[in-house]
Image (cartoon, rainbow, N blue to C red):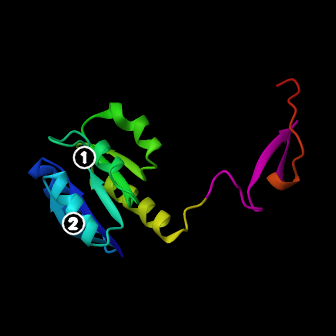
Amino acid sequence: MLNCIAIDDEPKALDIVELYANKVPFINLKKQFRDALEALNYISQQKVDLIFLDINMPDINGIEFLESLQNPPLIIFTTAYSEYAVQSYEYKAVDYLLKPFTFSRFLKAVNRANEVFAGTEKDISKPDETTSVIVKSGTEKYNIKLKDILYIEGAQN
């Protein structure tokens, strides 16, 4: 179970996160905040595994809020501004939901957060031994395990 909070200055956005979170059995939305500074106080006293975080907010924006945390929990950005998407990777955000987002997109993000939290997210940079590629030579097709490939060279087509 992921203990979560949502921080957004827009009440309707918080309502959507709450509606969607209530549909997901492993999400426990503990509290919602329209003021990031209030959330900062809450986080210092309560265990939070995941934050749904808006970026463009008054007083302190989501990026500044995140930078103020010594040991930040998992983050899913929820914002209407696509220009911060690349920057979100610098903060190891689990996902970036662009408003308005659908329930299916929300579910994909929280499933990923749950995998990261549980430590079961597959590292695609380390393929397992069953991963293979199909190689065509003439009219024949060969299933070759990646672990058996020393190098690849293309010839003709």
Residue nearest the viewer, comparing 59 with 83: 59
Outermost residue toward the left?
11
Looking at the rendering, which quadrant does residue 126 occupy? bottom right
Residue that label 1 marks: 54
* Whether residue 85 is situated above or below residue 22 in the rendered picture: above
Relative image position of residue 76 (x, y in whole percent)? 35, 53
What residue is rendered at 27% in x and 72% in y?
46
Residue nearest the viewer, comparing 26 with 154: 26
Q: Is residue 152 visible?
A: yes
Relative image position of residue 125 (x, y in whole percent)? 67, 51
What quarter of the picture does the C terminus occupy?
Answer: top right
User: Residue 42's mark?
Assistant: 2
Q: CA distance from mark 2 to mark 1?
A: 17 Å
| Label 2 or label 1, whichever comes before in sequence order | 2
> What span is colored magenta in the figure?
123-145
Classify mark 2: helix, strand or loop: helix
Judge depth for marks 2 and 1 and give the one in front: 2
Relative image position of residue 33 (x, y in whole percent)? 15, 58
Say left or right for 38 vs 133.
left
Classify mark 1: helix, strand or loop: loop
Residue nearest the viewer, comparing 155 with 115: 115
Q: Amino acid at mark 1?
A: Asp
Residue 40 lies in the magenta-colored region: no
What quarter of the picture does the N terminus occupy?
Answer: bottom left
Say left or right for 142 vs 25.
right
Q: Amino acid at mark 2?
A: Tyr
Q: Are marks 2 and 1 in contact (CB under 8 Å)?
A: no
User: Residue 128's mark?
Assistant: none
Q: Is residue 145 visible?
A: no
What residue is rendered at 18% in x and 67% in y?
31
Would you call the spot at circle 1 few (<14 residues within 10 Å), some (14-19), or many (20 or more)?
many
What residue is rendered at 54% in x and 68% in y?
119
